Image: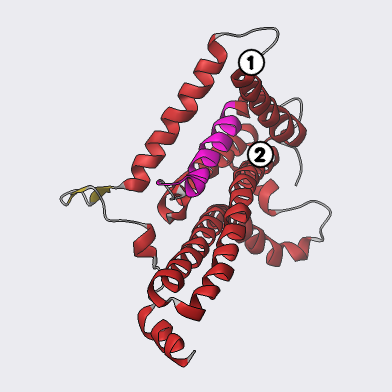
Amino acid sequence: MNENGSVLAEGYTPPTPADMHLPDFFQVDSLGFGFGKQMLLVILSVVVVSIFFMMAARKRAMVPGKAQFIAESGYLFTRNSLGKDLIGAQHFKPFVPLLFTSFFFILINNLYGSIPLIQLPSFSHPGSAYALAIVGYLTWVGVGIKRKGLVGFFKDLTMPSGVPGWVYVILVPIEFLSNLIIRPVTHALRLFATMFGGHMAMMVAASLTQFLVMSVGGAAALGGIASGALGLFLYFLELMIQVIQAYVFTLLLAVYLQGSVSEGH
């Protein structure tokens, strides 16, 4: 046991973020640009989503096939549950394409982390998560300013009604910081952190199982059964979280849009 413990302490090297995010396929140093696996998967997700829904809509039938049923169910889910119910029946229609695209784009990129050989959720890279959050941020801020005017939008965002005037001295900076600075940061961070942390946990469980079984052997190999079971549990847990995070990101986007088109704070 001591010998196995010594080997474990000296020989096991846990995976690092560098093992998750492999080097770029090529780089353009003059532009500071690199193209790697993560960017390739993002582009692939656009192709996958586009082809699936175009093919599902090509042969529309009164009795839908499996592809048409999945496509229609997905569209109705984002249209009604994330659009109509949250933004409101009067305002939701212009935002359905954005909500629909966001949900399925995020969903496919998240599910990459559970697909063998691919095994990389695209949004485990912070840049892609923040880029997507910026698109949402510019959209709901732009909609709010267009609908209410610059002054009206910021007033509605930072000065809730029914509050004594002297409280605004404290409340306005807090609301400004919370709604216009912290909100977009946490919108992206929530997606990035869950994808990164969950996938890293699965990598640790898988690498530890491999090490215990193949490198240590003996009685310590029995520990590989426990770490393997943990890895399997984490796999299905992460699969569930990948779907939930696509929903949560799009739901929050719909909530922010609702605040931009509604009257009052």
Answer whether residue 238 is magenta in the image: no
Seen from this angle, which residue lies furthest bottom?
2
Asked which secondary structure carries label 2, the reply is helix
Q: CA distance from mark 2 to mark 1?
A: 30 Å
Question: Residue at horizontal 39%, vertical 41%?
Answer: 41
Question: Residue at horizontal 63%, vertical 63%?
Answer: 173
Report the amino acid beneath label 1.
Gly
Extent of the magenta region: 97-117
Percent x, y of residue 260:
66, 39
Toward the viewer: 254 or 235? 235
Asked which secondary structure carries label 1, the reply is loop
Percent x, y of residue 55:
51, 16
Question: Residue at horizontal 63%, vertical 55%?
Answer: 237
- Disc number placed over residue 65 in the picture, else none: 1
Toward the viewer: 17 or 234? 234
Neighbours of disc 2 within 10 Å: few (<14), some (14-19), many (20+): many
Q: Relative to residue 25, is residue 10 depicted above or below?
A: below
What residue did someone put label 2 on?
254
Report the amino acid beneath label 2.
Ala
